């Protein structure tokens, strides 16, 4: 009797525990699903930022094609009838899948065409995860091929993800470590990256993960960087490994990750903690180095060389201060005002021997400060 009642008791306890475990399991799964959806959305968004900075000038704002072929096309994105691959892949004899086709082309460029190599593997500015993101963005058009996309509001696509503020920043280089960087970090931490939901720090009260107060001071930037991009690499006293989402290295740009570390290192530098407007971009001209990053990120260097060779457009070597001759026979000295006009209104005067192929959208997509930086970069090439 005694034995049986103990058994019943033990069974009841076990069932009770199981119910609790199942309940928490379900809650946890739900949470993971939400994160997974957020990451996919974020991946596409990062891709959108890269696309509008680096690709739209040649492939069109809606992927409709300009100097480069249309990317928003069923021909590229939708399997041919009765086939497992889209027509364009079959045509080019590509035996891999669509993602590897796009990522390979973007990473290595197309030799002998103006399509630049964008991947770090081939000397370009973007890491593999950023190439993955821009491929995700392009492939997302396949959900609705031929659709005319309206720009920013249309950037978010799947999984019921809420749009987050796009973070546009020259991807190639980290911004100077300053107030704006920590502010961007705070915005990412409390907003789109969701760190605050799991961690206690600077007013955030999450308890799933460790308290991050003083973490950079204690363990150093490298450790924190590794913990963010590869959370499985370390366990942390009393907190189970596996509960921090993997994939941040994949869905955030290098600039965003470094900004978060800046914020963790010095939350005071993010300014007033109640300030609602996150800084996404340092203000004011930043100089020729930033100009170079912008010229790369905005595809200028896909058409303009800096070594005297002629690509789609004239070289920038020796351009500043020289005399440019136009199709109509007139000339002008390439000073700041002329360069500004060439960038915001490229068809005003066409350089002799060239076609009017330069995108006319830079006046809208670049700020005055950014244009100033690009001009100061061109000036450094005057020799
Ligand atoms: C300077 C102009 C230029 C820029 C900038 C540019 N592309 Fe291209 N791209 C081209 C051209 C031209 C081709 C076609 C090359 C050929 O003839 O095979 C191409 C081809 C491609 C293809 C293969 C399309 C197909 O149907 O085979 C993909 C994918 C692509 N580009 C993606 C991108 C992405 C992503 C970016 C930005 C990171 C980008 N391109 C930036 C000019 C450009
Ligand atoms: C779903 C919950 C969750 C989210 C979201 C999350 N973390 Fe974590 N984090 C954890 C857990 C749990 C750990 C401890 C176990 C481990 O190291 O994997 C951890 C560990 C860390 C550590 C190591 C701390 C130490 O003391 O060793 C750092 C740094 C960190 N997270 C930063 C971040 C940042 C930055 C973000 C946002 C980009 C973030 N976390 C988002 C749960 C989360
Ligand atoms: C798709 C190719 C292409 C891209 C991308 C491009 N340009 Fe051009 N650019 C041209 C061509 C072609 C010309 C010459 C025809 C003309 O005057 O419009 C030109 C002319 C210029 C000139 C005048 C050069 C001279 O010798 O007088 C400047 C300055 C310039 N571009 C700056 C830029 C900047 C800055 C960017 C990026 C923000 C950029 N271009 C992106 C093709 C391009």
Image (tube, rainbow, N blue to C red):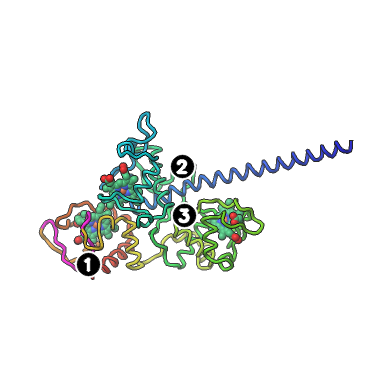
Q: How far is mark 2 from mark 1, CA to CA?
A: 46 Å
**Residue 182 pos. (x, y %):** 49, 64
Is 315 inside the magenta-drawn segment?
yes
Q: Is residue 271 among what the camera can see? A: yes
Which residue was labeled with disc 1?
320
Nearest the eye: 377 or 79:
79
Q: Is residue 60 among what the camera can see? A: no
Question: Looking at the picture, does residue 274 appear above or below residue 83?
Answer: below
| Quarter the N terminus occupies | top right
Q: Give the numbered dot on residue 158.
A: 2
| Residue found at the very far right of the displayed protein | 1
Query: What is the magenta range?
Result: 310-328
**Residue 325 pos. (x, y %):** 14, 61
Q: Is mark 3 within 8 Å of ligand 2?
A: yes
Q: Does dot 1 land on a helix, a strand or a loop?
A: loop
Q: How far is mark 1 from mark 3, CA to CA?
A: 37 Å
Which residue was labeled with disc 3?
252
* Mark 1 surroundings within 10 Å by alpha-carbon count, few (fewer than 14), some (14 through 19), many (20 or more): many
Determine the main secondary structure of the stretch shown in magenta: loop
**Residue 120 pos. (x, y %):** 38, 56
Q: Is residue 48 left or right of residue 376?
A: right
Question: Looking at the picture, does residue 1 appear above or below residue 223?
Answer: above
* Mark 2 surroundings within 10 Å by alpha-carbon count, few (fewer than 14), some (14 through 19), many (20 or more): some
Q: Does dot 3 land on a helix, a strand or a loop?
A: loop
User: Which numbered disc flags the more N-terminal residue, 2 or 1?
Assistant: 2
């Amino acid at each position: 009797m005694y034995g049986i009642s103990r058994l019943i008791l033990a069974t009841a306890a076990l069932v009770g525990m199981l119910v609790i475990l199942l309940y928490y399991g379900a809650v946890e799964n739900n949470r993971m699903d939400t994160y997974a959806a957020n990451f996919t959305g974020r991946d596409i968004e990062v891709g959108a930022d890269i696309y509008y900075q680096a690709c739209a000038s040649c492939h069109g704002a809606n992927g409709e094609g300009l100097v480069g072929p249309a990317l928003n096309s069923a021909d590229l994105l939708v399997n041919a009838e009765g086939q497992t691959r889209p027509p364009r892949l079959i045509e080019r004899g590509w035996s891999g899948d669509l993602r590897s086709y796009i990522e390979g082309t973007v990473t290595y460029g197309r030799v002998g065409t103006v399509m630049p190599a964008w991947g770090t593997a081939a000397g370009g500015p973007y890491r593999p995860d950023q190439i993955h993101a821009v491929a995700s963005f392009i492939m997302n058009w396949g959900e609705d091929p031929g659709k005319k996309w309206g720009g920013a509001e249309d950037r978010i696509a799947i999984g019921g993800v809420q749009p987050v503020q796009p973070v546009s920043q020259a991807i190639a280089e980290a911004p100077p470590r300053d107030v704006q960087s920590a502010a961007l970090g705070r915005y990412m931490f409390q907003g789109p990256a969701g760190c605050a939901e799991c961690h206690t720090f600077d007013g955030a009260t999450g308890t799933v993960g460790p308290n991050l107060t003083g973490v950079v001071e204690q363990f150093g930037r490298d450790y924190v960087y590794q913990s963010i991009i590869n959370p499985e690499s370390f366990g942390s006293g009393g907190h189970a490994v596996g509960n921090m989402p993997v994939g941040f290295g994949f869905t955030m740009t290098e600039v965003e990750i470094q900004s978060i570390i800046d914020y963790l290192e010095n939350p005071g530098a993010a300014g007033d903690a109640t300030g609602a407007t996150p800084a996404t971009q340092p203000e004011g001209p930043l100089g020729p180095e930033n100009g170079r990053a912008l010229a790369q990120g905005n595809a200028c260097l896909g058409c303009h060389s800096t070594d005297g060779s002629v690509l789609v457009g004239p070289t920038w070597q020796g351009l500043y201060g020289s005399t440019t001759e136009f199709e109509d026979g007139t000339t002008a000295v390439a000073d700041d005002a002329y360069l500004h006009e060439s960038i915001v209104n490229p068809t005003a005067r066409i350089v002799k021997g060239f076609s009017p192929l330069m995108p006319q959208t830079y006046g809208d997509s670049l700020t005055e400060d950014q244009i100033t930086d690009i001009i100061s970069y061109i000036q450094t090439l005057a020799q």
